[in-house]
Each structure stands twice: as structure tokens, then as C-alpha cells.
Amino acid sequence: MLPTTLTQVVGLFNVFVGLMLTVSMLLMGAGILMWGVRLGTWPTYRTEAIELMEWAVGILFTLILLLLVSQFVQQHTAAAVSVLGIIVLGVVAWLAVKASQDATASTEEH
């Protein structure tokens, strides 16, 4: 049951990533258009257009990585669930150690 549900969630995530990739491409196009329109003006404010394009490239790169991860989860569900379990176990162990350190530190102060 879990692998099927996980695959469905990842499929929905693929739709979200596809929409965000489209938004990233539109942002890039808007940045290029803004940069070109402000070419001969004074003051140009072209740095704002370059910042917009930088954000678009950053979003695009991040979303491509997320899409690769979701494709891995869809193709290798058992391995992905195992890795996720190990990560959750590690976080729980870290929280337990942190809580015991905090408890020890608070008893030493009193």
C-alpha cells in the first residue's frame, strides 16, 4: 500500500514541478525582455533584470534536481523508502541525544 501511495504523491509532485518549471521559464523570458527594453535608457536599472534572470536560473536548477529525485523515488520505491526510514531514524536519534544533553546541562546548572 505504501509504495503505491508514495508513487501517487510523487506523480502529483511531478505536476507541481512541471508548473514551476513553466513559471521559471516565464521569469527568464520576462528578465530577458526587461533587460532588452531598458538597453538605451538612463538610468538603466538593468541589474534588476539580471537579478530576475538569476532567480529564474536558480529556480530552474533546483526544480530539475527535485524532478530527478522524484523520478528516482518512482523508479526505485523500495530503496527510497529504506533511505527515508534511515533518515527519520537518524533524526530521531539526534533529537534524543540533543534532549539528553539539554537535560544534563540544565541539571548541572542547578
Image (spheres, rainbow, N blue to C red):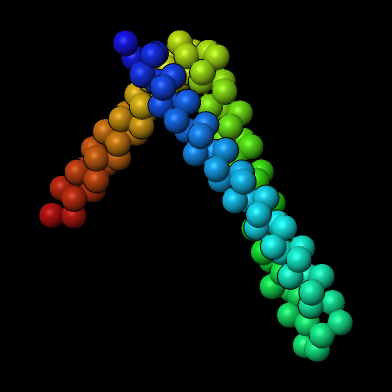
* Vertical side of 105 occupied by 15: above or below: above
* Vertical side of 78 occupied by 21: above or below: below
Where is residue 13? Give x, y as percent: 47, 33
Residue 65 in view (yes/no)? yes
**Could you tell me which residue is drawn at 57 percent across and 38 percent down?**
18
Residue 50 in view (yes/no)? no
Examine the image and state in which quarter residue 33 appears. Answer: bottom right
Of residues 103 and 38, the one drawn nearer to the viewer in this rendering: 38
Where is residue 74? Give x, y as percent: 51, 18
Q: Kindly give the residue lying farthest to the left in the view shown.
A: 110
- Image-based side of 56 in relation to 44, left or right: left
Of residues 79 and 32, the one drawn nearer to the viewer in this rendering: 32
**Could you tell me which residue is drawn at 58 percent across and 32 percent down?**
67
Where is residue 73? Give x, y as percent: 51, 20
- Image-based side of 110 in relation to 22, left or right: left
* Vertical side of 43 occupied by 49: above or below: above
Work out which quarter of the rendered image holds the N terminus and state it: top left
Work out which quarter of the rendered image holds the C terminus and state it: bottom left
- Image-based side of 81 in relation to 48, left or right: left
Of residues 37 and 64, the one drawn nearer to the viewer in this rendering: 37
How many marks overall? 0
